[in-house]
Image: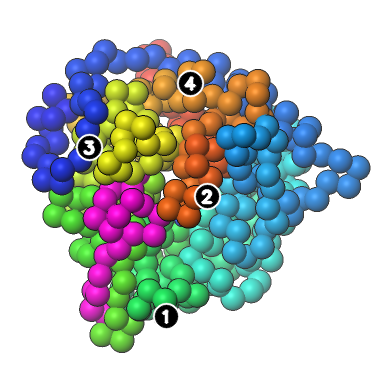
Amino acid sequence: MLKKLIGIISLPLIITSCTQAEAESVEVDVDADLEYCAAQVERSLHELSSDSTDYTMMPRNIASTDTVWHCRKATPDEWCAGFWPGILWYDYEMTGNEVVREEAERYTASLEYLSQRPAFDHDLGFLVFCSYGNGYRLTHNPKFKQIILNTADTLATLYNPRVGTILSWPRNVEMLGGHNTIMDNMINLEMLFWAARNGGSHRLYDIAVKHAETTMKHHFRPDYTSYHVAVYNPTSGEFIKGMTHQGYSDNSMWARGQAWAIYGYTVVYRETKDPRFLDFACKVADVYLAGLPDDYIPYWDFNDPSIPDAPRDASAACVVASALLELQGFCQDEKKSVYMDAARHMLASLSTDSYRSGAHRPSFLDHSTGHKPAGSEIDASIIYADYYYIEALSRMKKLESESSLMAKR
Ligand code: GLY
């Protein structure tokens, strides 16, 4: 059924199995999974605390050979510093544990300075919307709101109207040969949409929409698989080339890049209700789903010739599971159930002993791949996998609560 919905895919993906579409729907024990996350959060907080806990040191990863969090200082170039505060906010939302909330406040506060300085690069959305965004959603603290609004204005300074996208890496303009935009940048648009709806300039909305349109035009191959990086002439706006940075090759489908595209276009549809973006979100999701192995957890790059011996990327599975739980809500009939079933399969696999960190590490999950070409964070626990895992579980929990309420009516 999945194949029928997806249609013909032209890129020669390395597909180990596509039988998942016919598989029975699986159950996810969301409450048990959230309890597991809560226990791992408590354990991490305990291991990270000392008489003088440094709240600017954020858990980033645990190497496959290690058992404790490797932390990095929340400096402007540490793009992952917002995920740990974000995890704490989600855990607080799910458990109501006030100790976790206090810790969330403290870690979040370490990122305030980002709203008071020029942009280092595009990652401001990851940094400030995962932390302050969730914090504001749960507390309505007006200070948090102002920090997000200021940061959205800072992010907008990287927008080039001649190109129609936000510059991702100012530091790499010369090396890459122009204005560069990476697929990950789609995630940062959510903060611009939010700011435009919450007292910021409407220009932020316009920038986000134009960025999504330009990316849709140039950042994808005809089969809807994405380049990681698009390079543009900063003066004429002309598209120069598509290439990779963290993937296997310029023309391969890097799993997390495609995951950012699925998540990003789902958000853009939510915010604009423009059917072009819904159609596109489905297309980029379908090509990803068609290339998954049996357990729905992708290899780090769908075109790595060493598959099935290549490392997996659980983080991409978490991002996509969370995105599909939103995307299915915008779809009808077969497509809705395909996306819902796929998200369930992803969460069910991630919640097995094969992917859980369990007793041997304080993270939620193992088996993510950060930057394989650089030999960095391969088959590791990585903080953004945990962030999107708990986000997906909380989305699933809310969907279950809504459907049980509907059943009672
Ligand atoms: N560059 C962000 C990522 O690894 O997805």
For badge 4, the amino acid type reads Ser
Q: Which element is circle 3 on? A: loop
Residue 161 shown left or right of residue 33 in the figure: left
Q: CA distance from mark 1 to mark 3?
A: 34 Å
Residue pointed to by mark 2: 376
The answer to which image quadrant residue 137 occupies is top right
Dot placed on the residue nearer the N-terminal end, 4 or 1: 1
Q: CA distance from mark 4 to mark 3?
A: 22 Å
Q: Which element is circle 4 on? A: loop
Dot placed on the residue nearer the N-terminal end, 1 or 3: 3
Q: Which element is circle 1 on? A: helix
Q: Position of residue 329 (x, y in %)?
A: 31, 34
Residue pointed to by mark 3: 14
For badge 2, the amino acid type reads Ser
Residue pointed to by mark 1: 174
Q: Which mark is residue 138?
A: none
Residue pointed to by mark 4: 354
Q: Nearer the viewer, residue 204 or 11?
A: 11
* Highlighted range, magenta: 237-255
The residue shown at (68%, 32%) is 67
Q: Position of residue 313 (x, y in %)?
A: 42, 38
Specify few, some or many for label 2: CA neighbours under 10 Å numbering under 14, 14-19, or 20 or more: few
For badge 1, the amino acid type reads Glu
For badge 3, the amino acid type reads Ile
